[in-house]
Image (spheres, rainbow, N blue to C red):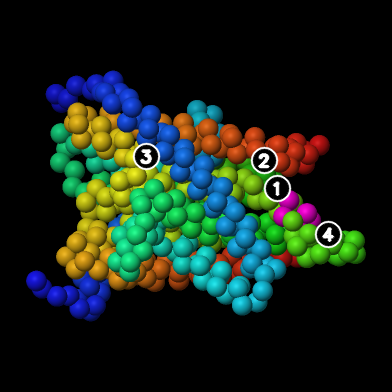
């Protein structure tokens, strides 16, 4: 039997950590883009668009990420597409995070006083112009802390992709456990690595919140 | 495309499906109540508790909130036996849920406590109430009322998160879906059905918590509107 030192375990976990980081970044970027589109539809003047996106958000917030992953993994395969685990993972995480980000940002857009909408519509601005020049620049300030905070949820969400077989940090942890029979050490190390990724983001989000709140205090 | 959908296929094993739904409900019923109880205790400890306890509770909250639920579950189920603590899959799942929800609800409830006006506490002191009485009767009810929607959302999130408990062979809804698709190879249909059931459970749970909130605290929204 080959014996593993703690360093062997850590090294292999760190190698897998890359994929967690990469998947998180991709999901955050793509989810943010899709979320922005959803946000525009969610706040549009067309009632049916608002209803449609409301359903979209309800759907992704009201079902487990694991089920969304399974559906992406098996659903696309039905249409004759070869779906590798990383693609299903990225797809499900993108849709999932877009729903949450859109809803977070909608709260920020709602926080902008109605007068801003009315004033800009008096200037004959179109909806897109209002969003681009008046609403979003102001909403952005309030949106940054919760958005950074949500990135923590994305990093943690990637752990679930191990279940469909994407080899990231969690999956590597399981595989190494099977080889080393040291579940306590391995999972403690895995948890520590997630913590090392997420904790700075949480702290940053909190400090941003304090900073922006201080600016708003009268 | 030559695939023929058979949306009745997931019902091939009705007993498994029903059991799955019941176990999921059991998990969130027990995990939800105990988790919020832990959260209330944690919020008390962080705001009124003895000084030495505060950093411990903070560390617990930070650690749990910054690691994935799946890893917490694996650590409890696979990791603890490694140091000699044996634990069944249902107990492990419940423990993980309580620990997880406890950390989140602690933060949420603490925010509610911070929002209670100081004058209320001073009024309680002037009535010669003890610290514990003030916490129970003056601080906690309005704090819970304020954060009830956030707490409800968190309970729903934990219920949805419980789907990963299928990975340690807890026979809940996701496990049922896996079981059924393993038997009849109708993976898409069985996952679609279980996803729909989760959606219904989430909507139902949210309604239930809203009703509970109305009953416990009156109708805060209606009061504010009036």
Subunit of label 2: B
Instruction: Report how far apart the C-alphas of labels 2 and 4 lie in the structure.
Output: 22 Å
Q: Which residue is at a point 41% across and 46% down the rendered structure image?
A: B162
- The residue that mark 2 highlights is B213
**Coordinates of residue A130 in the picture (x, y in percent):** 56, 46
Label 3 belongs to which residue?
B172
Give the mark toward the camera: 3 or 4. Answer: 3
Query: Residue B85: which quarter of the image?
Result: bottom left
Tell me the distance, in whole angstroms, between the alpha carbons under discs 2 and 3.
27 Å
Chain letter, disc 3 residue: B
Q: Whole-Å distance between the Cαs marked 4 and 1? A: 15 Å
Q: How crowded is mark 4: few (under 14 residues within 10 Å), some or many (20 or more)?
A: few
Mark 3 packing: few (<14 Cα in 10 Å), some, or many (20+)?
many
Instruction: Check the image and report above or below for B202 versus B34.
Output: above
Among numbered discs 3 and 4, the one appearing first in the sequence:
4
Give the percent coordinates (x, y) of residue B16. Answer: 32, 31
Q: In which quarter of the image is residue A211?
A: bottom right
Instruction: Judge the density around disc 1: few (<14), some (14-19), many (≥20) Cα neighbours within 10 Å.
Output: some
| Image vertical order of residue A67 relative to residue A46, above or below | below
Disc on the earlier residue, 2 or 4: 4
Marked residue nearer the N-terminal end (1 or 2): 1
Q: Residues within 10 Å of mark 2 (few under 14, many from 20)?
A: some
* Residue depth check, mark 3 versus mark 1: number of the one nearer the observer: 3
* Magenta stretch holds residue B138: yes
Pointer 1: what residue? Answer: B145
Q: Which is more N-terminal, label 3 or label 2?
A: 3
Asked whether residue B143 appears in the rendered view, the answer is yes
- Cβ atoms under marks 1 and 2 closer than 8 Å: yes
Q: Nearer the viewer, mark 2 or mark 3?
A: 3
Residue receiving disc 4: B120
Label 1 SS: helix
Q: What stretch is highlighted in magenta?
A: B137-141
């Amino acid at each position: 039997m080959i014996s593993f030192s703690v360093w062997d375990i850590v090294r292999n976990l760190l190698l897998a950590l890359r994929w967690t980081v990469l998947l998180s970044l991709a999901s955050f970027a793509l989810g943010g883009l899709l979320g922005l589109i959803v946000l525009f539809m969610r706040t549009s003047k067309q009632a049916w668009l608002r209803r449609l996106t409301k359903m979209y958000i309800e759907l992704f917030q009201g079902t487990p990420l694991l089920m969304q992953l399974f559906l992406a993994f098996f659903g696309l395969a039905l249409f004759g597409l070869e779906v590798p685990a990383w693609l299903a993972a990225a797809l499900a995480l993108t849709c999932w995070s877009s729903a949450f980000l859109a809803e977070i940002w909608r709260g920020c857009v709602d926080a902008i006083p109605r007068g801003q909408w009315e004033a800009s519509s008096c200037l004959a601005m179109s909806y897109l112009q209002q969003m681009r020049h008046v609403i979003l620049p102001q909403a952005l300030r309030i949106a940054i802390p919760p958005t950074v905070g949500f990135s923590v949820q994305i990093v943690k969400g990637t752990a679930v992709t191990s279940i469909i077989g994407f080899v990231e940090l969690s999956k590597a942890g399981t595989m190494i456990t099977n080889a080393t029979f040291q579940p306590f050490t391995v999972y403690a190390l895995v948890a520590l690595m997630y913590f090392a990724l997420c904790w700075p983001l949480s702290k940053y989000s909190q400090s941003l919140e304090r900073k922006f709140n201080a600016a708003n205090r009268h | 495309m030559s695939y023929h959908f058979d949306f009745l296929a997931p019902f091939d094993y009705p007993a498994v499906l029903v059991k799955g739904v019941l176990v999921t409900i059991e998990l969130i019923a027990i995990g939800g109540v105990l988790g919020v109880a832990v959260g209330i205790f944690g919020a008390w400890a962080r705001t009124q508790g003895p000084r030495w306890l505060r950093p411990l509770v903070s560390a617990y909250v930070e650690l749990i909130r910054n690691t994935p639920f799946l890893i917490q579950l694996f650590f409890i189920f696979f990791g603890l036996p490694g140091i000699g603590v044996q634990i069944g899959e249902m107990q492990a799942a419940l423990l993980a849920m309580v620990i997880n929800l406890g950390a989140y609800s602690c933060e949420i409830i603490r925010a509610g406590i911070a929002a209670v006006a100081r004058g209320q506490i001073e009024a309680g002191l002037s009535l010669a109430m003890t610290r514990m009485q003030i916490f129970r009767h003056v601080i906690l009810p309005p704090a819970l009322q304020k954060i009830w929607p956030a707490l409800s959302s968190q309970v729903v999130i934990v219920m949805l998160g419980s789907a990963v408990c299928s990975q340690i062979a807890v026979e809940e809804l996701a496990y049922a879906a896996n079981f059924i698709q393993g038997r009849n190879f109708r993976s898409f249909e069985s996952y679609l059905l279980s996803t729909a059931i989760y959606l219904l459970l989430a909507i139902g749970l949210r309604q239930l918590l809203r009703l509970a909130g109305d009953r416990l605290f009156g109708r805060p929204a209606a009061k504010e509107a009036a």
